[in-house]
Amino acid sequence: MEFWNFLFVPTILFMVIVAPVWIVMHYQSMRRSSRSLSAEDRETVEHMLETVDTLTERIATLESLLDADHPEWRDSVRERVQEERQ
């Protein structure tokens, strides 16, 4: 019985002081680590940005071809959009 009396006070102190502080610090560190992107996420974002740049160049090329072949195409597109809105 002497052994249990010896562990009673340290156990209560651990549960009241150490465990809550430990839990709070654990979740703070988890929140900090989740804020930044992982290496895989960064690669995915970089790939998406490259794809966006490529698609932007393609759109510019297509628009220049349409401007050369059909100079009034922008006006007709604007008219269609306005008709759809009404």
Image (spheres, rainbow, N blue to C red):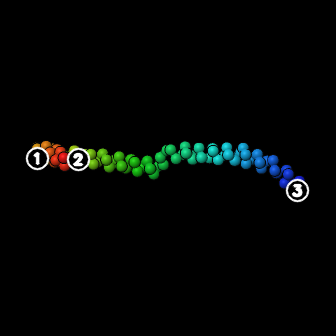
Q: Earlier in the sequence, mark 1 or mark 3?
A: 3
Q: Amino acid at mark 1?
A: His
Callout 3 touching callout 2 (CB < 8 Å)? no
What residue do we see at 77% from left, 50% from top? 11
- The disc labelled 3 sits on which kind of residue? Met
The residue positioned 89% from the left and 53% from the top of the image is 2
Does residue 73 appear in this view? no
The numbered mark, 1 or 2, whose residue comes first in the sequence reads 2
User: In terms of depth relative to the viewer, which is nearer, 73 or 8?
Assistant: 8
Q: Nearer the viewer, residue 57 or 7?
A: 7
Q: Residue at x 59, y 44 (%)?
A: 28
Front tag of 1 and 3: 3
Instruction: Classify 10 Å Cα crowding around label 1: few (below 14), some (14-19), many (20 and above).
Output: few
Q: Residue furthest right?
A: 2
Identify the element where label 1 is drawn.
loop
Q: In terms of secondary structure, where does tag 3 sit? A: loop
For the residue labelled by badge 2, is the local secondary structure a helix, a strand or a loop? helix
Label 2 sits on residue: 59
Q: Which mark is residue 37?
A: none
Name the residue type under label 2. Answer: Ile
The residue where tag 1 is placed is 70
**Residue 1, labelled with which disc?**
3
Q: Nearer the viewer, mark 3 or mark 2?
A: 3
Q: Position of residue 14 (x, y in %)?
A: 74, 47
Task: Measure the alpha-carbon separation of dots 1 and 2.
Answer: 16 Å
Q: Residues within 10 Å of mark 2 (few under 14, many from 20)?
A: few
- The answer to whether residue 3 shows anywhere in this view is yes
CA distance separating discs 3 and 2: 83 Å
Circles 1 and 3 in contact, beta carbons < 8 Å: no
Q: Are marks 1 and 2 in contact (CB under 8 Å)?
A: no
